[in-house]
Image (spheres, grey):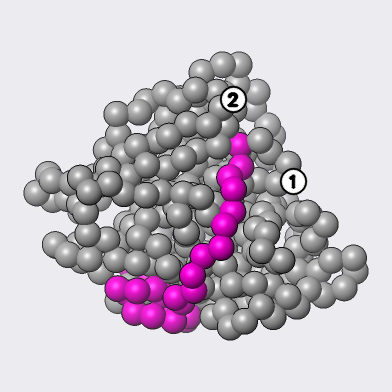
């Protein structure tokens, strides 16, 4: 299976941990805070909803399949090139829904209120626990003063990292992709979950996701994600954020962020079964991948561990 970074005509490759994670495919990034994804079988997922398709557009509207993204960084810092993710939240409650509010401050210190659409949305928000469980993919809403609100589903105790992915549409960072993050604590008895062993298959809601190909750090390789059900290939994938699948990856240990995309722009409710990728993951080790896809109006999330040598 191959990967690609979020695509845009003016951007080059997505960097993971200071190194670019390059993918030549275009998956979707996000919807609204009600259009979200979470790990199947976990209580801290989110509720999916339909979203518009705008893949194939320029950097002010969406991403073109096969185009490179800019250097987003590894997603582990709260500031980059004068832009800063700010939030007063350092702790969130366990076991119940919580609203996480934040702002993006520009180089002038003022809240940014102008954002370009990237794969149908102006802001993409992710949350994951330090052991790479509890994945949530949300699309928050912004108030007039630049305050964003992400409605998180119930969180398990532990340390969580929240990521904001965005593209300013004015100022010195216009047209550049950013991924900034902060950590937040959820109090309680944190039970760490061991990372599942590397595998080329995963199950989600009766669907089987299979990865074909190989990944080596610093080298690009073609890969394919195939989706089946009951032993038969799935050919009714519906558009999700402008494409047929959404793929996010986090590196074990440091939570380096990589946003990856399938290559083909969605056209109608007949996607699948195979989604091609071209990936270059620069860092060796285990990556936890979360693949989201839609059928019958329902969003599914499959998770698996990929070992990169």
* Residue position marked by numbered label 1 in the rendering: 197
* 164 to the left or right of 95: left
Q: Earlier in the sequence, mark 1 or mark 2?
A: 2
Q: What residue occupies the far top of the structure in this picture?
A: 188
Residue 65 included in the magenta stretch of the image = yes
* Residue 287 to residue 43: above or below: below
Circle 1 — which element? loop
Q: Nearer the viewer, residue 231 or 250?
A: 231
The x, y position of residue 150, in whole percent, is: 42, 42
Q: Which residues are magenta?
A: 44-70
Q: Residue at x 66, y 35 (%)?
A: 43
Check residue 234 in the rendering and tell me which mark sits there, or answer none: none
Density class for disc 1 (Cα within 10 Å; few <14, some 14-19, many ≥20) is few
| Res 256 visible | no
Quadrant where the N terminus sits is bottom right
* 74 to the left or right of 132: left
Q: Residue at x 75, y 63 (%)?
A: 209
Give the number of callouts.
2
* Residue 13 to residue 158: above or below: below
Density class for disc 2 (Cα within 10 Å; few <14, some 14-19, many ≥20) is some
Tell me the CA gap for discs 1 and 2.
Answer: 27 Å
Q: Residue at x 41, y 75 (%)?
A: 63
The x, y position of residue 62, in whole percent, is: 39, 73
* Residue position marked by numbered label 2 in the rendering: 95
């Amino acid at each position: 299976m191959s990967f690609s970074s979020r695509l845009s005509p003016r951007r080059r490759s997505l960097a993971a941990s200071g190194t670019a994670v390059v993918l030549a495919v275009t998956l979707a990034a996000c919807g609204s805070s009600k259009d979200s994804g979470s790990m199947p079988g976990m209580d801290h997922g989110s509720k999916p909803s339909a979203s518009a398709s705008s893949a194939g557009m320029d950097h002010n509207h969406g991403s073109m399949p096969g185009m490179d993204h800019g250097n987003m960084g590894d997603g582990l810092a709260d500031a980059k090139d004068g832009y800063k993710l700010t939030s007063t939240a350092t702790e969130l409650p366990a076991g119940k829904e919580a609203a996480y509010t934040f702002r993006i401050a520009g180089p002038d210190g003022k809240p940014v209120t102008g954002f370009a659409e990237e794969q149908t949305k102006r802001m993409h928000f992710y949350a994951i626990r330090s052991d790479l469980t509890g994945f949530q993919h949300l699309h928050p809403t912004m108030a007039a003063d630049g305050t964003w609100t992400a409605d998180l589903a119930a969180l398990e105790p532990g340390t969580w990292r929240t990521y904001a992915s965005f593209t300013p549409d004015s100022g010195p960072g216009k047209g550049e992709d950013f991924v900034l993050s902060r950590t937040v604590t959820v109090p309680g008895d944190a039970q760490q979950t061991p990372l599942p062993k590397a595998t080329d298959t995963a199950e989600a809601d009766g669907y089987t996701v299979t990865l074909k190909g190989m990944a080596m750090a610093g080298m690009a390789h073609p890969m394919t994600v195939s989706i089946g059900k009951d032993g038969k290939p799935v050919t009714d994938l519906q558009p999700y954020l402008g494409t047929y699948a959404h793929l996010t990856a986090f590196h074990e240990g440091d939570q380096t962020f990589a946003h990856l995309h399938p290559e083909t722009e969605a056209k109608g409710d007949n996607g699948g079964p195979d989604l091609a990728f071209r990936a270059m993951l620069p860092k060796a080790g285990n990556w936890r991948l979360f693949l989201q896809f839609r059928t019958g109006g329902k969003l599914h999330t499959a998770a698996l561990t990929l070992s990169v040598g």
